[in-house]
Image: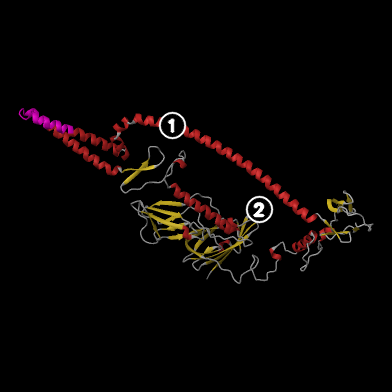
Amino acid sequence: MTVQKDVTKNIYVGNGSTRTFPFTFECPAEHPEYIKVYLMQDDGTALATSDYQLDMDARQITYPSSGAALPEGKKLVIMRELPLQQMMNLVNNGPYFAEDVELAFDENVMAMQQIAEKLNRSIIMSVDIDGDAFVNEVPFEAGKSFRIADDGKSIVLTEDPARVLPLAQETYAQAQAQAQSAYASAVAAAQSEDSAAASASEAGNSAQSASVSAASAAESAELTSGYKQEALTAKNAAAASATNAKASEANAKTSENNAEASKEAAQSAASNANNFATSASSSASEAKSYRDAANNYAANAKNYSENVNVFLPSVSSAGVLSWTNKAGLANPASVNIKGDTGDKGDTGTAATIEVGTVTTGAAGSSASVTNSGTASNVVLNFTLPRGKDGKDGGVTVDAELSDTSTNPIQNKAVKTAIDTVTASIPTKVSALENDAGYLTKHQSLEYEKYVSYVISGAASQPASSVMQYTATGAFTLNLSSISSKLAAKEATVFTTYIKSNADYTLTITNAGTIKYIGSASDVAITSAGLLLNIMMLKDASGNVASIVQASKLS
């Protein structure tokens, strides 16, 4: 299935006789619950109804299920409404069915079309409005309306013109009455000299009241034309605003100067922050250098402590100089540094012995000791050879895999083992042993079953493999939906049972080249019923051929 139409609803106006209404939008045949039907009420609201019959194959509804047809002028709306859910669950190494994935994609597109249809019925701002600079929150107060603010950046409350208009009309009527009263008083003053002054005064007062009322009526009329409530307050304060204009201008100049100073301070702060950031970056780089040097010193110290061997000398009471070391290397030959006993001489100054320098010689060279001092003040300088490195570091490497050895293993032994396992893994699912009884597409169940829809009418465009029809006249079977689902080199079988209370003709369309088992005249509906089997095949070039077998029932 594909979603090729950007249509989510159909709107019909009743004529008092039509009861069948088609829908032209896409909808999965297995989800009739996605179809919703609404009746528009006199007040403009939509009322959902379930009093209809739905035919997913014919793609139409019948409203109402029984009774009078939709009255003339009444609107009926057929819509596709999907739940905004995603029920498909794909797991690693699990089954993957292309039709299920295709259906999930189709329903996602349908959901987006559904949302787009609602947005198309919404009030939105034009594309030249900066949405980030506009506060689109709508204020709410009972009995009030709202409008766009004068600065064009928000929505504000205002008086409802429907409420203000009657007040303005009443004020205008009062002004007319007072004007007529003033006119009558003036006429009376002219006719009666005695009451002229009083009448003239009364006429003047009435005229003044009429003028005030007329002005009030004009203001009310302006309000009903869309003047905002705030404008009335602003008008009352207009004189004070004019008086304060100069002061506001001076304050604005002061604010401008303060803003300039703030700008310079901000630029200075930004420059200082940048300098601090640069210094911090330099300090961080310098700290990293110190850290790297410290790590290097630590590594060298560890190397010296582990790899530099020290021969320690000792002299016995017999005057024999011998050596020891912690590396287990051969020590230099012991040397008797005590000479033969000579003649007893005069008591002299006691001799001293100290170690001078210790030098590491090349591996394999001989150790040597020299005296850089005197016979009575001995300073011994040592040259000690470095020991040879052990073969392979003294570690045994296995040439084969083992479940007991703790030695390292050669790379080639690991690769050989992996290659052996890889070669034993089948490259096709069909080569695996089906020891758990799982089904494959080449295996059959004990029996097959299908949903069998029952359709009554004069034509059908089936989408499933098994259908039932009740013919009420000449019947047309359109097989375009089934043939379109076939890929090249694929085949399918369509079976239908058609029952009727009379004999009618049967026409098969969109089935490619049709061949008949028996005679084409056998394909006819009888009062006893008809069993129809159609095998459809599509060759490598996309051509469709159908083999029709019709069996008249008795």
Q: Earlier in the sequence, mark 1 or mark 2?
A: 1
Residue located beneath label 1 in the image: 256
* Dominant secondary structure of the residues highlighted in magenta in the image: helix
Write down the quadrant of residue 539 in the picture.
Answer: bottom right
Q: Residues within 10 Å of mark 2 (few under 14, many from 20)?
A: few
Q: Nearer the viewer, residue 433 or 190?
A: 190
| Rendered view: 487 above or below 119 | below
Q: Quadrant of the N terminus?
A: bottom right
Q: Residues within 10 Å of mark 1 (few under 14, many from 20)?
A: few
- For residue 546, side relative to residue 324 (left or right): left
Q: Which residues are magenta?
A: 185-208
Q: Nearer the viewer, residue 233 or 507?
A: 233
Indicate the secondary structure of the residue bearing disc 2: loop
- Residue 416 in picture, x, y percent from top left: 79, 61
Q: Residue at x 68, y 46 (%)?
A: 290
- Residue 22 in picture, x, y percent from top left: 45, 54
Q: Residue at x 40, y 55 (%)?
A: 38
- For residue 461, side relative to residue 413 (left or right): left
Amino acid marked by disc 1: Glu
| Rendered view: 143 above or below 438 | above
Residue located beneath label 2 in the image: 541
Specify the label residue 119 is tagged with. Answer: none
- Residue 86 in picture, x, y percent from top left: 53, 58
